[in-house]
Every structure is written in structure tokens, then in C-alpha cells.
Amino acid sequence: MATLNINGLDKDKLLIHLRYIEVKNVDVLVLRDTRLNKQGYQMMSALIRGYFHRQHIQVRYAHVLQSSEQEHRVGGQLVIVRGRWTRTLFNFYEDPTQLGLVTAIDS
């Protein structure tokens, strides 16, 4: 398991982290401070599933709500689970504050 604070997630950063998962054989990766809204997570989820196209994988997220265009986003988490843990995890608990700061997973 690995966790990283990434200060915003875009496609280029995501591809680097997906390669990291492969090279280090990481089963669970938690990316923190992604700063993505729901649509951004849906796009990233599709990219992740495409990258691991023949593997069983789970992607869960806690997105950041934004009340106005000028507001600066912080928070947001993305959890990628692959390998042996995909069949045993999980219940995913999204942040009740809807700031995307706290999540939990269990089996």
C-alpha cells in the first residue's frame, strides 16, 4: 500500500503514478489532494481502467465540491485497488464533509 500527496492530478501525473504501481507492484494506492471534481474523477477512472485493461481493478474517489468558479479547490482523494485486494475489499466511506479530505476502506 502506498499513499501520496500529489497537489492536483492531471493525465500526465496519473500516468506516472500508474507506472509506479506496476514497477513497485503496489496493490493499493491512495492519491491525496487531487483537487478534482466529480467529472474529473470520472475521466481519471476511465483512464485507469483503460491502462489496466485486462486486470481486475477498483477505483474509488472522494471528490471536491466547488461552490463558485473563483474558489480554489483543495482536497480530494483517489483510491486505486488492484491485484489480490480487489476481491476482498471493500466498503468505501466517502468524506461526510464533502471536502474530499477523509475516506476509509475496509473488507
Image: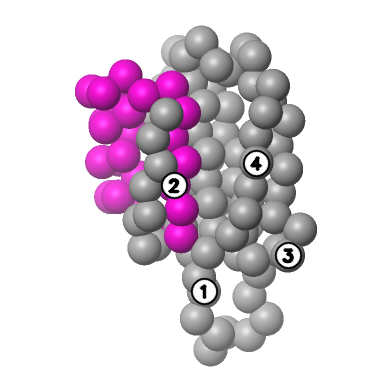
Is residue 65 placed above or below 95 in the rendered structure? below
Is residue 49 placed above or below 41 in the rendered structure? above
User: Residue 90 shows which numbered tag?
Assistant: none
**Residue 58 picture quarter:** top right
- Say what secondary structure mark 4 lies in: strand
Residue marked by disc 2 = 31
Residue 81 among magenta residues? no
- What segment carries the magenta color? 9-33
Q: Quadrant of the N terminus?
A: top left
Residue drawn at point x = 50 percent, y = 70 percent: 74
Label 2, label 3: how far apart the Cα atoms are: 18 Å
Amino acid beneath label 1:
Arg
Going from N to C along the chain, the mark reached first, 1 or 2, is 2
In the image, taking residue 14 as reference, residue 16 lies left or right, namely left
Amino acid beneath label 4:
Ala
Amino acid beneath label 3:
Thr
Q: Nearer the viewer, mark 3 or mark 1?
A: 3
Residue marked by disc 4 = 104
- Say what secondary structure mark 2 lies in: strand
Label 4, label 2: how far apart the Cα atoms are: 13 Å
Give the x, y percent position of residue 65: 66, 69
Give the x, y percent position of residue 37: 58, 62
Label 4, label 1: how far apart the Cα atoms are: 21 Å
Residue 30 among magenta residues? yes
Label 3, label 1: how far apart the Cα atoms are: 14 Å
Q: How many marks?
A: 4
